[in-house]
Image (cartoon, rainbow, N blue to C red):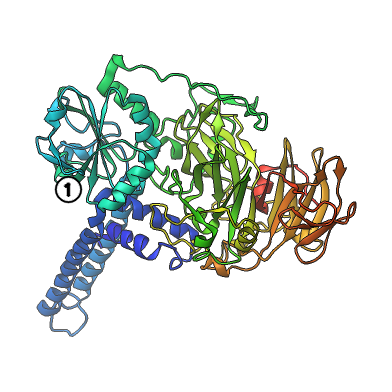
Amino acid sequence: MLAGGYIVWFWGTTLASGAGALNNSGAFRFFETLSQRATETFGQNALFWGLALGSLIAAAAGYAFLKDRFTGGGSDGDPKDGKPPTKSRGRLLKGTAAAAILAVVVGVFVLATGSSDDGSMAMAAEDEAQATPGTNAAPAGEPAPTDTFLFFDGTEATFADYRGTPLVVNFWASWCPSCVAELSAAIRPAQDRFGDEVGFIGVNLQDDRERAVELIEETGVQFDLVEDADGTLYTRFEAIGMPFTAFIAADGSIVDTHNGPLTEGQLADKITEFLLGDSAEPPADPEPAAADPDIAAPAVAPDVIVETDPDVPGLLAQLQGWVTDWGRRTIDLDELIAGIPAADPRDVIPPLDFPEYESVTAASEWLEGREPGVLVEIGDDVRFFPLRIMTFHEIVNDTIAGRPVVVTFCPLCNTAVVFNPTVGGETLRFGVSGLLRFSDLVMWDSTTETLWQQINGEAIVGELAGTQLELLPSAVIGWDEFRTSFPDGRVLSRQTGFERGYGINPYVGYSSSSSPFLFDGDIDDRFPALERVVGVTVGDADKAFPFSLISGPRVVNDTVGDLPVAIFWGSDTADALDTADIAEGRAIGTGIAFDRRVGSDVLTFTANGDDTFTDAETGSTWDLLGRATDGPLAGEQLDTVVHRNDFWFAWAAFNVGDPVYGT
């Protein structure tokens, strides 16, 4: 039982890859988090150690039982009265209960401290137990290990060969999710900034060589790549957990270490403080991007709260490694809750920073016809992001048609939103913070560590609080609609670098439940909490169109703000949050919002009952994706309006007082 924390790793990795066995979203997030933390803390041998310790405890319990059985012991220690040995049995039960409690403590310890910056390397065990976050692991001036290490190209070297060059030595592996996230979020930006002054050695720990090389190529990180197949170098540094980073000064001494993933800002601060000192140059201001008439400049809300000494709730104060400015905010900090219980939950659900794509033909081998995905169309570049993948990653940072984009999906709110991540001329990289607000995903950017609300793109806490990301049009459609309409389109590949149960719904039965998960607020009871609505956004105007009111007529002609819009409803798109197998989900359909103007004409649509629509003005026929397929306007395309297919509770929580169609 002492190995409970480790054995959870086995369940989390082996059985919860799709979480169908758990059948509970909360349990899935807990097991997935603990799985990753245990793996990062104890490496790929976590299961071995778990089973070994479990066997030890089982042997101890068996020994106690057999000893009592053969040595006897009556109810009062008298072996002759023939009654069960209650005292020894009581001791055995107490011991078992104590072991069970200890197992839980070990599991929680793994979860809470697996990636903390405890900074322990050469401390004595008793000092390590008292170490505080940020404590240097090795005494200043301790020399780097003298071992000869092997590069991936077959050559050898020692740290002495780098004398005169300050070094960042990063231990990483492709099997470690936090390592993968750190490569793109922190290591690569640091190399871009400090690469001329600092050397970067990447020590690949007990990994698949081919996968490691592929990952380095994907991330663009420029390491002197060292192979540590047996963990010798890792042991020499007395490292704990993964990733692990050591900072070696130009004179060859270890000046600092960090246990767990680093953010871009943390890594830059450590390089500046420990390796470069006063010689470090501040980063140059980015060149302003050329003005694009189609992209509105992000707006800054006037109601930003600024406090020099903010009262930070305990949940947030205990987060380790965060440099978020809690004194700048647009919300009450108490509205933030933990979606993932970890000391640093950022990117435990890993975003995709270097996504791969494949053809419609190739994707048809594994995607089913009714499966939903996010359609993003920018110019002639059309992409499909299957929800079977988005559910496990929630964020994709990418470039489409030469324009930076971030594609997001929050399973708890069913919100698929696409943003332009450019702020002040700089493209931000977004990740999953591990925090929620009204059940909605709270994102973070790795440049300023500002927190952003996914459902509307508003910066809610941090340096950029009040900034509004530009929303880009998108739609949730079925795979059949995409592959028929866009045979040359590109599809997000399952080759993500992560092993996940793509196609398995980790939130089985969620969409048919009566209440949302991890929602801390008042639910508007005008509609069922998890009914879907088409939430349309036009500038500052928002309006909801509940599926229950639009699925009958299948089209609604309306106005949002000053824009005439048409809401088309149809298809038999599967519910991604229903059955364990996403492809078998109940037919929920989809709602898509369009600008119903063509030239100077405003069109009025009626539904034909077969996912086609006819406009009253010209008699032209239109499909579900807003394309005129017949009649005088054949070949015309309606412009998609920014909209989402939210759960009602989520739309209502973030749009208090905004109009709702039919009410």
What residue is disc 1 on?
231
Residue most toward the right?
617
Residue 302 falls left or right of residue 630: left
Residue 156 falls left or right of residue 335: left
Height in image: 564 above or below 193?
below
Q: Is residue 411 visible?
A: no
Q: Which of 591 and 360 is in front in this view?
A: 360
Please tell me which residue is depicted at 17% across the width and 72% down the height of the picture.
62
Q: Where is residue 255 in the image (x, y as percent from the top left)?
A: 20, 27
Q: Nearer the viewer, residue 427 or 395?
A: 427
Q: Where is residue 265 in the image (x, y as percent from the top left)?
A: 39, 29
Q: How crowded is mark 1: few (under 14 residues within 10 Å), some or many (20 or more)?
A: few
Please tell me which residue is depicted at 79% across the width and 66% down the height of the picture.
609
Q: Where is residue 505 in the image (x, y as percent from the top left)?
A: 51, 63
> Looking at the rendering, in which quadrant would you find the N terminus?
bottom left
Please tell me which residue is depicted at 33% across the width and 48% down the height of the picture.
214
Q: Nearer the viewer, residue 109 or 623?
A: 623
SS at mark 1? loop
Height in image: 353 above or below 325?
below
Please tell me which residue is depicted at 35% across the width and 55% down the height of the picture.
35
